[in-house]
Amino acid sequence: MKQDKYTEKLTYSVRSMEQLTAAAWSMVIECPDVAAKAQPGQFVNLLPDGNFTLRRPISICGIDREQGTLRIVFEVRGKGTAALSQLRAGDTVNMLAPLGHGFTLPAKETRAILIGGGIGTPPMLPLAQYFGANAVVISGFRNQDAVILQADFAAAGAKTILCTDDGSAGRFGLVTLPLEEEIAAQKPGLICACGPLPMLRATAAIAKAEEIPCQVSLEERMGCGIGACLVCACRTVDPDGTEQYRHVCKNGPVFNAEEVQW
């Protein structure tokens, strides 16, 4: 769903911070105005304290409208995310949100297969909470030390399938094998995915071959997060075959898989 206007307020309070793995952190932010507007698949853009000029885009992992909070889960990958990981409950954070075009969701009764790879896993959680027992969540990670959110998916009522590259947790191998197995067992009405480009490309190919609607959330480097700097351009194709560049921050991050020029 597209959100045309982000909130004008920028400073929000951190309600909680939790370290999930050696690199991954979970932050809950008090932001009733943002939580009221946010949709699954959208993202926030955070400006770390210190000598930073660029914001860090992070997918929304949880929306609690009653509590007026958003949850984000991110990995420390540089100085900016390292600074964000130092925040604690009661601190404030500079946030521009909600941003981007999120998932277009059918009825909750639809059987949906949700695929997350690595840090592309968090945006699948709001979808799992929406579809509940009608969702199958397939998560892929490098190894057991990188695994996150499996208990959260189970708590949402979804069937969970865990894969790791080295077999140290869950199933050994890629997420595409259990995807094909689940399709063979019962064809879903929707596939949603977020993660590394090769994973998205393979998922999109399977969905196309099986004639299953598929939506993918793309990960691209961003500057502004609002469509002004043009850094996050990606090639897409219209139904009539016309190719054009769109911007992940504004036109996405969620696209119909067949729109993307892989």
Image (tube, rainbow, N blue to C red):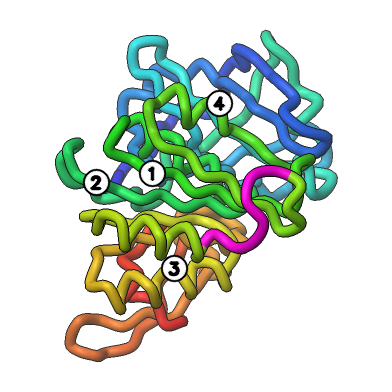
Q: Earlier in the sequence, mark 3 or mark 2?
A: 2
Q: Position of residue 114 (x, y in %)?
A: 41, 49
Q: Residue at x 42, y 82 (%)?
A: 261
Q: Amino acid at mark 3?
A: Thr
Residue 237 shows up from this direction: yes
Q: Are marks 3 and 2 in contact (CB under 8 Å)?
A: no
Instruction: Give the number of the disc on residue 203.
Output: 3
Q: Is residue 176 above or below residue 66?
A: below
Q: Earlier in the sequence, mark 4 or mark 2?
A: 2
From mark 3 to mark 1, how far is it between C-alphas? 14 Å
Q: Amino acid at mark 2?
A: Arg
Q: Is residue 174 shown in magenta?
A: yes
From mark 4 to mark 1, how far is it between C-alphas? 14 Å
Provide the residue span drawn in magenta: 169-175
Q: Is residue 152 left or right of residue 259?
A: right
Q: Amino acid at mark 1?
A: Val
From mark 4 to mark 3, how far is it between C-alphas? 24 Å
Q: Are marks 1 and 2 in contact (CB under 8 Å)?
A: yes
Residue at mark 1: 136
Q: Is residue 136 shown in magenta?
A: no
Q: Residue at x 57, y 33 (%)?
A: 150
Label 4 crowding class (10 Å Cα cut-off): few <14, some 14-19, many 20+? few
From mark 3 to mark 2, how far is it between C-alphas? 17 Å
Q: Position of residue 73 (x, y in %)?
A: 61, 35
Q: Earlier in the sequence, mark 4 or mark 1?
A: 1
Q: Are marks 4 and 1 in contact (CB under 8 Å)?
A: no
Q: Residue at x 79, y 40 (%)?
A: 145
Residue 249 shows up from this direction: no
Q: Earlier in the sequence, mark 1 or mark 2?
A: 2
Residue closer to the observer: 176 or 37? 176
